[in-house]
Amino acid sequence: MTIKRYAVIMNPYGGNGRASAVWEQVAPLFANSGVETVVYATENQGHGRVLAQTLDPLTHDAICIVGGDGTVHEVANGLLAREDQARFDLGFIPAGTGNTLHDHLGLRDAEQAAKTILRGMTRAIDVVRLTTQGEPVYCVNIVGWGAISDIASLAERFRPLGKLRYSAATLCQICRPRLRKAKLTLDGMMSQDEFLLVIACNTKKTGTGMMIAPRAEIDDGKIDVVVLRRASRWQMSQLFRAIFDGSHLSLPFVEYHQVRSFGIDSETCDTLNLDGELTGTTPFSAEVLPRVLNVFA
């Protein structure tokens, strides 16, 4: 019997520093199943990408990610940027403030997630390849612009609030909405207007339980795009109240599209929210890469 050897990429700073404790909780499950694990703790931002890009496929059979959305984003980008095009099955153990992909896959606690990995069954998921400033970035969760980026920036300042920080930042954004002029392209069709926000979702939820894209599936070859052009503070508060159960799609000022490609060219060079990370700028173009990552699920 060949012994499996899994690389464990852990963000010790994720989830307000609880990732190490989460791994200690589930590590015995791997040991008792005869799986060897080698833990690689990330040391700084971007280290997860470097690790995934350089792991030896001859000595590692899969990658387990202990962290949140940011760590998943880094590992996915490292894996898809490999020159040798080696691919590893990916396992997700939730240990971050935001665990959006985990939630979509039904992996809501660490022990359940570990057992899912050890069961060994995988499924293929879509990824969005976005080109910004001439460089590719891969997203597994969201691409956000406008108020979505503003909320993420403010949420960083509210980090001591933990999971409540996204809701608090959203409420602040409602009080000071900002319109931006831009060209939005969806599957080749361009419209020019003023927008409050555009968010493209691969998963149903983002933030902490906000069901922004209730029709989204991570293996349908499409990305679900929610667009908000002009809206009053009252309408934005309606949106916020409805967004946790997906009923905001019934609001007449909310647009919902399912596309294979999209892009934004704004009057100003605006920072993007890519899987919760504030990186990249407009203008950008993006396309869905169907089923390019295998994940334990």
Image (cartoon, grey):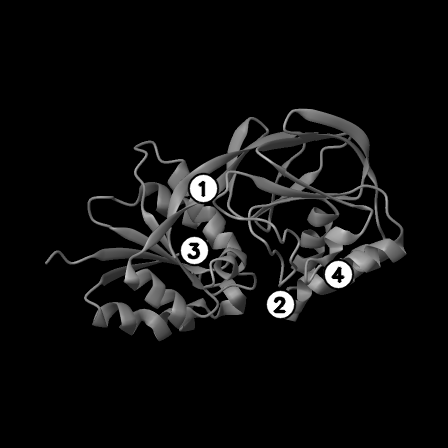
Nearest to N terminus: mark 2 or mark 1: 1
- Using a 10 Å C-alpha cutoff, classify the residue at mark 2 as few (fewer than 14 neighbours), some (14 to 19) or many (20 or more): some
First in residue order: circle 3 vs circle 2: 3
Tag 2 residue: 163
Q: Position of residue 217 (x, y in %)?
A: 53, 48
Numbered label attached to residue 149: none
Q: Position of residue 116 (x, y in %)?
A: 35, 63
Disc 1/disc 3 C-alpha distance (Å): 17 Å
Residue 77 picture location, percent across and down = 45, 41
Residue situated furthest front in the rendering: 250
**Is disc 1 placed on a helix, strand or loop?**
helix
- Amino acid, disc 2: Lys
Q: CA distance from mark 3 to mark 2?
A: 23 Å
Query: Which residue in the protein does label 4 denote?
Result: 242
Q: Amino acid at mark 3?
A: Glu
SS at badge 3:
loop
Quarter containing the C terminus = bottom left
Q: Which residue is mark 1?
A: 77
Instruction: State which mark lies toward you, 4 or 1.
Output: 4
Relative to 97, 12 lies left or right? left
Residue reaching furthest to the left:
1
> CB atoms at circles 1 and 3 under 8 Å apart?
no
Q: Badge 3: how crowded within 10 Å, few (<14), some, or many (20+)?
A: few
